[in-house]
Amino acid sequence: MDATRKQAVIDRNVDRLRREYPERFASLGEQDIRFALGTLIDNPGIADTDADHIPMGAVWQLACLY
């Protein structure tokens, strides 16, 4: 995936997660969420889903592990 498309996927999902999980989003922080989404995009085999369908719990785990 090229860098422009990757950034668009990250931006779209940051907005989605901010709307769907406002408290958890605030407690984790946007920078860590962006990093976790980027990790998922670069390594699609580490989760059972893709960036457009990942729940906040899985983002939380990725941010903590990676």
Image (spheres, rainbow, N blue to C red):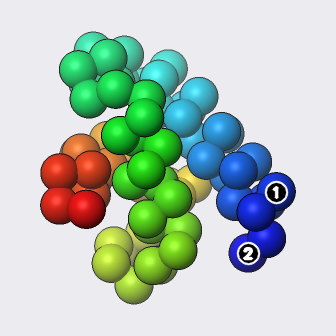
Residue 53 position within the rendered picture, expressed as x and y whole percent measured from the top left: 49, 55
Residue 33 position within the rendered picture, expressed as x and y whole percent measured from the top left: 40, 40
Q: In what quadrant of the picture does the C terminus appear? A: bottom left
Classify 10 Å Cα crowding around label 2: few (below 14), some (14-19), many (20 and above).
few
The quarter of the displayed image where residue 32 is located: top left
The answer to whether 36 is drawn above or below residue 19 in the figure is below
- Of all residues, the one furthest to the bottom in this rendering is 45
Residue 13 position within the rendered picture, expressed as x and y whole percent measured from the top left: 57, 41
Q: Residue at x 51, y 59 (%)?
A: 38
Q: What separation in Å lies between label 1 and label 2 (alpha carbons)?
A: 8 Å
Classify 10 Å Cα crowding around label 1: few (below 14), some (14-19), many (20 and above).
few
The answer to whether 1 is drawn above or below residue 60 in the figure is below
Q: Residue at x 76, y 63 (%)?
A: 3
Q: Residue at x 43, y 29 (%)?
A: 30
Viewer-proximal residue among 9 and 49 = 9
- Indicate the amino acid at tag 1: Thr
Name the mark on residue 63: none
The answer to whether 36 is drawn above or below residue 12 in the figure is below
Regarding residue 15, the answer to whether it shows in the image is yes
Residue 15 position within the rendered picture, expressed as x and y whole percent measured from the top left: 59, 28
Residue contact at pointers 1 and 2, CB within 8 angstroms: no
SS at mark 1?
helix
The residue labelled by disc 2 is 1
Viewer-proximal residue among 66 and 48 = 66
The residue labelled by disc 1 is 4
Viewer-proximal residue among 9 and 66 = 66
Q: In what quadrant of the picture does the N terminus appear? A: bottom right
- Indicate the amino acid at tag 2: Met
- Report the label total: 2
SS at mark 2?
loop
